[in-house]
Amino acid sequence: MNYLLGTDIGTSGTKTILMDTEGNLIAQDLQEYDVLTPKPLWAEQWPNVWLDATKTSIKNTVHKSGIPAEKIRGIAISGLYGGSGIPLDENMEPVRPCMIWMDRRAEAETKWVLDHIGEEKLREVTHNGADPYYGYTKILWMKNHEPENWQKTRLFLPPNDYVIYKLTGQIAIDYSSAGNIGGIFDMNNRTWSKEMMDAMGIPLSMMPEKIVESTDFVGGLTKEAAAELGLLEGMPVIASGIDSGAANIGLGVFESGIYAAAIGTSMCAALISDQPVKGKDLIVWPYLFDAKRLSYYFAGGATAGAIVKWFRQTMCQYELEVEKAGGKNAYAVLNEQAADIPVGSEGLIVLPYFMGERSPIWDSDAKGTIVGLSLAHTKAHIYRAFLEAVAFSLRDAIEATGENLGEYILLAGGVTKSKLWRQIFADVTGYPVVCPIHDVEANMGDVMLAGIGTGLLSYEDVKKWQVLDQKIMPNQENHRKYNDYYQVYKSIYQNLKSNMKTLTRLSTT
């Protein structure tokens, strides 16, 4: 039997799993960390945090498995959308922290792009718009605000590609990571757009020359990396790509016309398509499978699981202390309590815009909001309203896509651990929900890509793996009630939009 590793570098943690080539999970390890938020709407991470967590999670997984190194035949490494990418100097050392996808500081740069290049031209070439979410606007922010760092920078690399470089000594970027930078990637020809880069004053030399498929062999482990990880020198490292796309691969999505929502810290609700999708406000980049033909069209919340984690960390100190003392998991306690609360949390609506919002509303000034509180409401009411808010956000993303999404939607990520939350997603959207058996979706996708890239597996092999659980059917009575709440959810944002903008101005002056 041969074995494969899959590592996913996430926003709040890095996980590695080891599986055999028949799809059996053998071992796993998770290393957690935090995001730096030095100012409102800023979000950064130092790349050494990702590199250290990757090395530790791989080493621990190999050790836990007890599998001999010679039996472990390859690894693929996916990662969060690294926004600007890591700015590296001529010695390939980080110049500053990486401005990740969550960072929304580049408002002035977004306006400059719209004024000087125009949305029509931008969409014609890149199929994307202009917004602080995109990596290219963050790159422009650095150019405008940190000239010393700009002068030092020789190359931008996404998180997973940076870690791959550190393990192999080879520089490459996968198609999904390149496309997700936005305005400087030509989606028509699947390459860097010299036209757009010249217009923005971003040298072509700052982007990796080699663009690879997610199943491509990038390089073998160096002697030093292999010794540190407990693996063999030269073991193949496969590219993989953006983690939300890897999660779709882990759900068995290899074809056009399938809708899947990967919900972790954020939410990426995407339709995989070989044809243009009408939703103007969607984000698009090459998919991790057949990247020159298939595209990943998505909308979704900038903060999804992040707001529930925030609620636990901020409002649930008692539950956390009990958990630390050996008691029940805090999330399990909250879910049990919230399950007894009626649909709609007895008149509570939460807007999940805790870091502004990207597609479909594209508003950096959008704020997290709780509407409807009374003295009768409890912590359990508010917690359930947070769960419902993320489900409303998914429904908004579905409607923005504007396509027939089929008979059911796939749902992946940490949210699938909660039976209550899975049912809320089905009830709010009205779609049957299908979740994976194991909570390792992006990692599962990495293992599949590693298997295909090393030749140990074929697409036909991984398609046979049993990765999905039974359908969760929506409760139609609950769905009808949620329809009314959803309309209120939509209208609250519209009614408070100008107030949110004023709050931004007041808090930053």
Image (cartoon, rainbow, N blue to C red):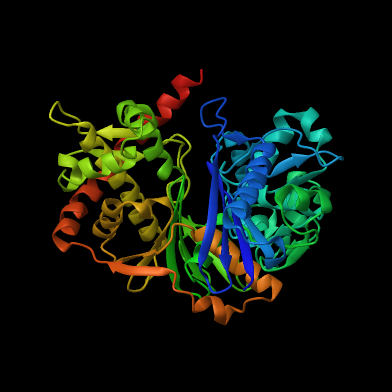
Residue depicted at 62% across the width and 52% down the height: 63
Residue 286 visible somewhere in the drawing:
no
- In the displayed structure, does residue 26 sit left or right of residue 194? left
Q: Position of residue 141 (x, y in %)?
A: 67, 35
Nearer to me, 327 or 430: 327
Which quadrant of the figure has residue 147? Answer: top right
Q: Give residue 354's quadrant in the image.
A: top left
Q: Quadrant of residue 32?
A: top right
Q: Quadrant of the N terminus?
A: bottom right
Q: Is residue 279 above or below residue 254?
A: above
User: Percent x, y for residue 84?
Assistant: 66, 43
What x and y, as percent, mark residue 121?
63, 56
Of residue 122 and residue 266, the one placed in the foreground of this image is: 266
Q: Residue furthest bottom?
A: 460
Q: Is residue 191 above or below residue 457?
A: above
The percent coordinates of residue 494 (x first, y second) are 32, 41
Can residue 60 be seen here? yes
| Residue sitting at x 71%, y 42% | 86
The answer to whether residue 144 is above or below residue 471 is: above
- Decide which of 439, 204 is in the foreground and name it: 439
Which residue is situated farthest in the top direction here? 509
Q: Nearer the viewer, residue 52 or 400?
A: 52
Residue placed at 70% from the left, 68% from the top? 189
Left or right relative to 413: residue 342: left
Residue at image location 60% in from the left, 47% down from the top: 134
Q: How many marks?
A: 0
